[in-house]
Amino acid sequence: MKYSMKNQYFGDVNDYKKYGLLRLLSNNGGKKIAVCWMLTADDGRTDGKLIYYLNDPGKWEKYDSQLFNLLRPCLYDPNKRNVSRTAETKIVPGAKYYPKLLTDVATDRERYFQEFMTMAQTCDLSFFDPDNGLEVKSMPIGRRNSRKYLYWHELKQVWGIGQSVLLYQHFPRVEHQKFIETLVDKVCRVLDVSNVIYYQTNHVVFLLIPRPGDEAYYLQQSQFVKKNWERQIQYGISGDKSNGKQHKYDLL
């Protein structure tokens, strides 16, 4: 089951967790977040219906009551299932959003990311929300459905403008912790970094690559993620061991 960034998914239980995470990392706008939706067209399928939680406030509202009540209109009005509501309702305080549709056309894609980086220059953290996550070998840029992935060279480009980066990654059908370790190791190699913070739910993981000066801040905010979201969002840290080559993984 995949949770793509399409309007048909707006407000579902996975969005609730995602926006809850972004709100805590933002700390009420203390850190400015640039959101690259990597929005793709709705596909006409019947999934994206996971809004059952909105009918059970006794269980779900406690995690973020303000956010819960901002998303609840999705339960009653399908016309409100649109990512534009994140800006309209200021779901993530102080955030900037790049709402254009992403296609499979390679030249369009290059322009898409250049425009996003121009928009994001005044922000502290760039968040990427692709349908699937980071690229896979079988999906070169320009191929049908390549729009569902963020490519490594694009990640390097954004890292190069001097921001911390957060990205969405759907779990494939493999053992989750091993997958996280493999992916984090590659992020560390590609970006030449030592530490990555990851936030894990049942179906997805968010990888946060903090700038060295931001590490303490994001670790502090991660404690609030742990406190507020309990088992719904768990976080862990990868860090260098003494030999500087191996990484340890601690789910906290």
Image (tube, rainbow, N blue to C red):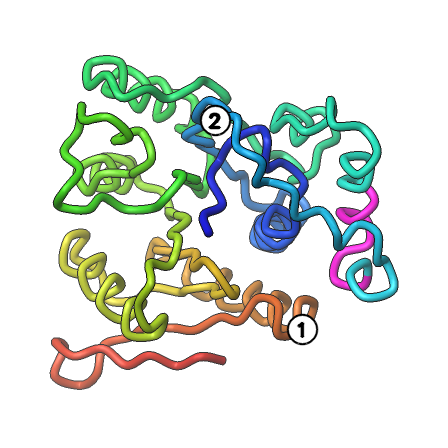
Q: Is residue 57 left or right of residue 88?
A: right
Indicate whether 20 appears above or below 218.
above
Q: Quadrant of residue 138?
A: top left
User: Is there any visible trace of residue 166 in the rendered image?
Assistant: no
Secondary element at tag 2: loop
Identify the residue position indicated by label 2 in the image.
43
Relative to 15, say whether 104 is above or below. above
> Residue at the spot x=33%, y=63% of the render?
173
| Contact (Cβ within 8 Å) of mark 2 with mark 1 | no
Q: Position of residue 85 (x, y in %)?
A: 69, 27
The answer, for residue 144, to whether it is visible in the render is yes
Rendered location of residue 129, percent (x, y): 43, 40
Local SS, label 1: helix
Q: Please tell me which residue is depicted at 59% across the width and 71% down the height of the picture.
A: 223
Circle 1: residue type: Lys
Q: Amino acid at mark 2?
A: Asp
Instruction: Residue 227: give its label.
Output: 1
Does 123 lie within the magenta span? no
Left or right position of 151 against 14: left
Q: Identify the residue at image location x=25%, y=31%.
A: 146
- As drawn, 209 above or below 239: above
Q: Residue furthest bottom?
A: 242
- Which range is magenta? 62-69
Sequence-wise, the earlier of marks 2 and 1 is 2
- Secondary structure character of the magenta stretch overall: helix
Q: Position of residue 22 (x, y in %)?
A: 57, 49
Q: Is residue 63 magenta?
A: yes
How many tags in the picture? Answer: 2
Residue 130 pos. (x, y %):
39, 38
Residue displayed at 38% across by 52% down: 169
